[in-house]
């Protein structure tokens, strides 16, 4: 084995541990894809379709991963040729024509052939030569305001390119691009199909799926500073790009990850306003994969593949040309990389090129694996996945993605039935093992959320009320039976909400036993030896039911317990929609409140002490660092309920000092004022 091959394989193994092994990436993608298929009918019922993009959807879980959403109105149909208007029903559909003549490459004008009933679209139209076109700036402005008014976390949204951008709990950046979808492949990109057929990449099946999917048009023009181009929209191939990334082999995906990390940690490290984004890295990789067919994309060639990508990037910067992969006439550097910025970027890249492959050592993440392979030649790297990651960690990866997966929150029984039908239809297909796990988890979450769904605001008889309670209780028990370990905590909350304190006590005891088992997994924390021993021969579905612990998510639209209403209100006032709480914290809270309701002061105080001890001495395995704000808050609520106002005051102060992940500072401040009032009256 040559030195380069040895280093490449060592780098492949190291980057699999950073970026993910093939199975880890497949788990992430299949869970995201399955969730999107099930949620789609629900979104259409609410008036919008959406598709998730960004690094998270591609399968990455590296730092600074973003989440992108493209959203569009399903009854607005974009056509590429006037003859396609016959495919749609007017006035049920609003038909919009793409005009690609006399515009910048990669852009189009959107001519409204029929009127729109949506004010955000109707008020974005502008007249050009007597015809109605949709203005980019008006459209972005209207939908930015729409996001601020209607979207959870979106009240602080800012305009960023074609997107409304906001941050979730100060950690995850979210981009929402409102756009239009065309079910047709644009005429200007037809040469791309012929090029792919000639180059034999992607495969015929992937190519057909991409063309069948069509494209999107997003509200940003080729030169945002040129007001005369305000009617020009960018043609987006985001869904096609996602399919291309999915079609890559794992070595290509690892190379993509290396390019992203190298860009962030080396090329853009000291640049407050960088010219390059990870989108350019993806474009480089697409061109290299398609054109350099002689390269063997295998682990032993990983460094060579990376080097070819870097050389192509440098040549593009030197020429000031970055051809779009689908429409090469569209030079994506035209308004980004030119003049002194281009010269400075080329100088930086050429200096890295002069160092050779050792330039990777400048990246803390990538460099350590290259350095390790250089210093220790006695190691023999094995690129087999079973040697890189044990099965145990694959289970942990699955549980982590289940915890990350979005809940199915429904607003009424009609939406609940719609989601159930979507799940049943999805289950009829040929599902992989991970897709089966996903549907089981989604079904559990759907039934659980159905239990806490608001009841209609109308007078109902006691008999009807009892029937509704039993119906929802059965749904909750089904959720516990098929869902994660932590679902039993929701059942306990349901008992408490309905004042069934004896049943609640039995439920809490059972929940405590289940959550305390040594082999349960919460945020990758578990006893590995006991997990492997206990779960030997157990099916993956049963492993999820016995071992997977997820955060307790409280939606602002649902009522769970009066004790946390101020926190839900504060969270919503700050523009958020969910409270995330560690299951053990909620469990201890329910113990305290239940004993207090039953008048058992001794057990109430003991449960209060157990919760306090948990927060004081936990090492992050049961109360994650980012959820300590709500955890201290809940301790304070319990202390306040039991009459310990001094302790409650100190706990609320601790909550204010933690990272405000749940955005409950307003509730903490109000509770502190209430406590001070009680103390003043007392003394």
Image (cartoon, helix red, strand yellow):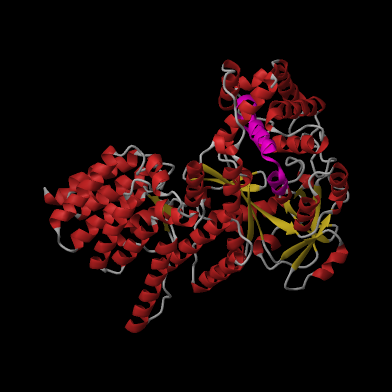
Position in image of residue 90 (x %, y %): 77, 73
Tell me: 85 left or right of 423: right
Image vertical order of residue 615 relative to residue 436, above or below: above
Tell me: 320 left or right of 548: right
Quadrant of residue 556 in the image? Answer: bottom left
**Front-most of residues 85 and 580:** 580
**Front-most of residues 519 and 405:** 519
Position in image of residue 534 (x %, y %): 39, 48
Q: What secondary structure characterizes most of the magenta part?
A: helix
Q: Is residue 191 magenta?
A: no
Image vertical order of residue 254 relative to residue 568, above or below: above
Q: Tell me the magenta residue range.
A: 241-268
Question: Is residue 68 visible in the rendered structure shown here?
Answer: yes
Residue, x 78% and y 32% (percent of image)? 295
Tell me: 344 left or right of 406: right
**Front-most of residues 229 and 316:** 316
Question: Is residue 527 visible in the rendered structure shown here?
Answer: no
């Amino acid at each position: 084995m040559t030195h380069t091959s040895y280093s490449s394989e060592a780098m492949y193994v190291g980057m699999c541990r950073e970026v993910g092994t093939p199975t880890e990436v497949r788990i992430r993608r299949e869970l995201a894809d399955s969730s999107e298929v099930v949620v789609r009918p629900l979104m259409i019922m609410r008036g919008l379709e959406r598709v998730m993009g960004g690094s998270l959807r591609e399968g990455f879980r590296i730092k600074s991963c973003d989440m992108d959403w493209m959203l569009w109105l399903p009854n607005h149909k974009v056509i590429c040729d006037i003859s396609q208007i016959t495919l749609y029903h007017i006035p049920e559909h609003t038909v919009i024509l793409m005009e690609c003549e006399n515009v910048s490459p990669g852009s189009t004008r959107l001519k409204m052939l029929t009127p729109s009933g949506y004010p955000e679209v109707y008020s974005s139209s502008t007249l050009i030569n007597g015809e109605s076109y949709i203005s980019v700036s008006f459209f972005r402005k209207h939908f930015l305001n729409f996001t601020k008014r209607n979207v959870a976390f979106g009240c602080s949204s800012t305009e960023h390119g074609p997107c409304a951008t906001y941050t979730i709990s100060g950690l995850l950046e979210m981009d929402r691009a409102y756009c239009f979808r065309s079910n047709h492949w644009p005429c200007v990109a037809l040469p791309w199909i012929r090029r792919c057929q000639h180059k034999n990449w992607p495969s015929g099946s992937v190519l057909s799926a991409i063309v069948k999917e069509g494209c999107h048009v997003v509200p940003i023009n080729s030169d945002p500073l040129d007001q005369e181009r305000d009617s020009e929209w960018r043609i987006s191939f985001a869904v096609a790009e996602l399919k291309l990334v999915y079609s890559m082999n794992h070595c290509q995906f690892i190379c993509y990850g290396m390019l992203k990390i190298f860009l962030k940690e080396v090329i853009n490290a000291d640049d407050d306003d960088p010219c390059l984004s990870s989108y350019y890295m993806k474009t480089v990789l697409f061109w290299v994969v398609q054109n350099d067919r002689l390269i063997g994309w295998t682990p032993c060639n990983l460094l060579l593949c990376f080097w070819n990508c870097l050389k192509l990037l440098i040549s593009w910067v030197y020429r000031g040309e970055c051809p779009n992969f689908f429409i090469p006439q569209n030079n994506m550097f035209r308004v980004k990389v030119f003049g002194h910025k281009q010269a400075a970027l080329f100088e930086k890249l050429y200096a890295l090129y002069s160092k050779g492959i050792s330039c990777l050592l400048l990246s803390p993440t990538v460099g350590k694996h290259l350095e390790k392979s250089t210093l220790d030649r006695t190691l023999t790297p094995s690129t087999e996945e079973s040697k890189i990651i044990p099965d145990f960690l694959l289970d942990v990866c699955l549980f982590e993605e289940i915890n990350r997966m979005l809940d199915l929150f429904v607003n009424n029984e009609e939406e609940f039935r719609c989601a159930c039908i979507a799940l049943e239809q999805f289950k009829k297909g040929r599902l992989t093992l991970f897709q089966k796990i996903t549907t089981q988890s989604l079904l559990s979450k759907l039934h659980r959320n159905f239990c806490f769904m608001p009841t209609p605001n109308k007078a109902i008889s006691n008999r009807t009320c009892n029937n509704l309670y039993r119906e929802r209780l059965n749904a909750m028990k089904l959720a516990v039976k098929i869902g994660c370990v932590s679902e039993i905590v929701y059942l306990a909350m349901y008992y408490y909400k309905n004042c069934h304190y004896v049943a609640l006590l039995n439920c809490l005891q059972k929940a405590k036993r289940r959550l305390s088992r040594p082999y349960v997994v919460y945020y990758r924390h578990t006893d590995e030896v006991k997990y492997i021993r206990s779960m030997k021969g157990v099916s993956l579905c049963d492993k999820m039911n016995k071992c997977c612990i997820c955060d307790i998510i409280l939606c602002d639209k649902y009522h769970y317990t009066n004790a946390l209403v101020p926190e839900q209100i504060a969270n919503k006032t700050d523009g958020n929609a969910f409270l995330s709480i560690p299951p053990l914290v909620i469990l201890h809270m329910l113990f305290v409140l239940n004993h207090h309701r039953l008048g058992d002061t001794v057990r109430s105080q003991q449960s209060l002490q157990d919760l306090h001890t948990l927060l004081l001495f936990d090492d992050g395995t049961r109360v994650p660092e980012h959820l300590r704000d709500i955890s201290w808050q809940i301790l304070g609520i319990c202390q306040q309920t039991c009459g310990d106002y001094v302790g409650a005051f100190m706990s609320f102060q601790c909550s204010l000092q933690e990272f405000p992940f749940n955005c409950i500072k307003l509730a903490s401040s109000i509770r502190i004022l209430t406590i001070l009032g009680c103390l003043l009256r007392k003394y």
